[in-house]
Image: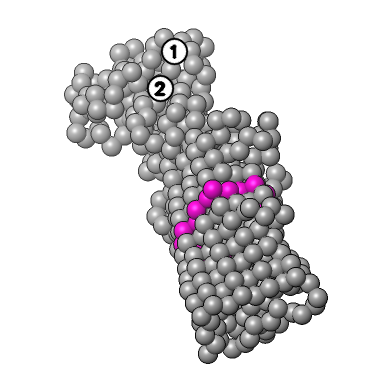
Amino acid sequence: MPSRRSLISMLPAASVAGAVLLSETASAALSGIHPDTGGAGGNVIAADSISDLRSINIPVRSTTAVVSGYATQGDNGGGHFWWNSGSTATDDGATVINPTGNSGSGRWIRIIEGRVRAAMFGAVGTTDDSSALNAAIAYAKANKINEVELSPYHPVQSTVNLLAGVALIGKGSPGYLGASTSYGVSNSAGPGVCSRIRATATIASGAVVTLQPDGANSDGFALVNVSIDANGTTNYGVLLSGASVSPAQTFPRVFRADGLFVQGAYLDGICLTDTLVTRFHNVTVSACRGWGLNCTYGTSDSLFIDTYIHTCGLIGSGGGGIQIGDGDGFLNFIGGKIEDNYGPGVYVYTSTSSNRVYLNNLFIVSNSYQGVTMNGGNVSINGGFIGGNSSYPAIQCAAGALNCKDSEIGGGTYNLSATNTGLIRAFNLVMSGSTISPYNNGSTQTIQTYNVVLV
């Protein structure tokens, strides 16, 4: 296969913008096809689209082609092709093109250097890009290319299945896009500040993007600089479940999200089950009806840096900021803000006493229920500010042990509340507004304080 550099060297300067190979008998009058009459023996031409490339007669002496777009010029789906006269590969509409009417051998073969571009497969933001996105991801995985570059905007009407070993790489960097405090955020269609995947219909499988494990080798998923909008119609923005693997005990590992924004899920913004080694950085979830981030079961050995969860949960009906479930352990949160959610800021429930959750330098404020509430396991809070409200404590522990150190606590009915078998150890705290209450209900709850200042 010739390299892209060798193809370009065959083009005259005026033709480098977009070239396709013509046969000697091909009609130069075909719309979108532009023959090159000079340089390289006249064997390179330019075409506007993949459709135009397919309409070219079988080349006699032309061996290279450049296309300026998938559907239209400049849509980022064009590229460089070479003519393989012996190929009988299946026309996939993207990397292999069979000329119209050709029943024998001979195919245009796309040259790909670096990332796969989703636009190469027709994901150019017109009506429904889901099939084209899935085709691009499958091609990248099969050919060990590993990265798929997104276009600015992708409307979808079925799930995008991100396969193990593949990263979706967007353009730009997501900011805070939420336009409403309700879960049904309805931002207008079209690109945002980064590449955007938006459900434009209810997706029956339940997720806009599903990270799809494939058994024992389910390693290496990534979403980078991507905005995912469930648009109030689809249950999950991002869904990853090791339980969907056969055998089910195979845990997908290494899910990396960097510059990810999720909004508008009918249930949870991001839902993780049976997942190892998750790495989040600069992840924002807003306006989801359930939990912003729901680690339902078995999520462990994971790091979350600069996480922002805002206005999640349905008023009076469950959900909230972050839920950490049974079997989750060794989860480390560093920095970020959990605020204005219609439920607890962080809720930890587990029957596994050895589980560990670390909340470092988080600001957990203005949530409708407790700032942090737990019912088992071990939670360590270090730094940051934890607030409650007039009806609920800032920190409540009903079971397990919670250590709170070098933090500021305030704003709840009580700053610290231990009930049932809960244990709270507080070190070097500044607490404002309310007092400490262990609820003397005859159970074994305990609050131990060391160098706590009430202001």
Main secondary-structure element of the magenta-colored stretch: strand
Say which residue label 1 marks: 87
Question: In front here: 222 or 252?
Answer: 252
Image point (49%, 9%), residue name: 104
Q: Does the image show residue 271?
A: no
Residues packed near mark 1 inside 10 Å, few (<14), some (14 to 19) or many (20 plus)? some
Give the position of the N terminus as an image quadrant.
Answer: top left
Q: Is residue 386 above or below residue 66?
A: below
Say which residue label 2 marks: 109
Across and down, in percent, residue 322 comes to: 62, 62
Quadrant assignment, res 441: bottom right
Question: In front here: 170 or 40?
Answer: 170
Reply yes or no: does residue 309 show up in magenta.
Answer: yes
Across and down, in percent, residue 436 comes to: 64, 82
Image point (51%, 22%), residue name: 91
Quadrant assignment, res 396: bottom right
- Magenta stretch? 296-311
Q: Is residue 178 above or below residue 256?
A: below
Reply yes or no: does residue 128 show up in magenta.
Answer: no
Which secondary structure lies at badge 2? Answer: strand
Which secondary structure lies at badge 1? Answer: loop
Question: Image check: 297 left or right of 90?
Answer: right
Whichever of labels 1 and 2 marks the residue nearer the N terminus, that label is: 1
| Amino acid type shown at disc 1 | Ser
Q: Is residue 31 above or below residue 97?
A: below
Across and down, in percent, residue 258 comes to: 45, 52
Question: Image check: 32 left or right of 142?
Answer: left
Q: Does the image show residue 301?
A: yes
Across and down, in percent, residue 349 comes to: 69, 59
Image point (37%, 43%), residue name: 74
Circles 1 and 2: CB atoms closer than 8 Å = yes
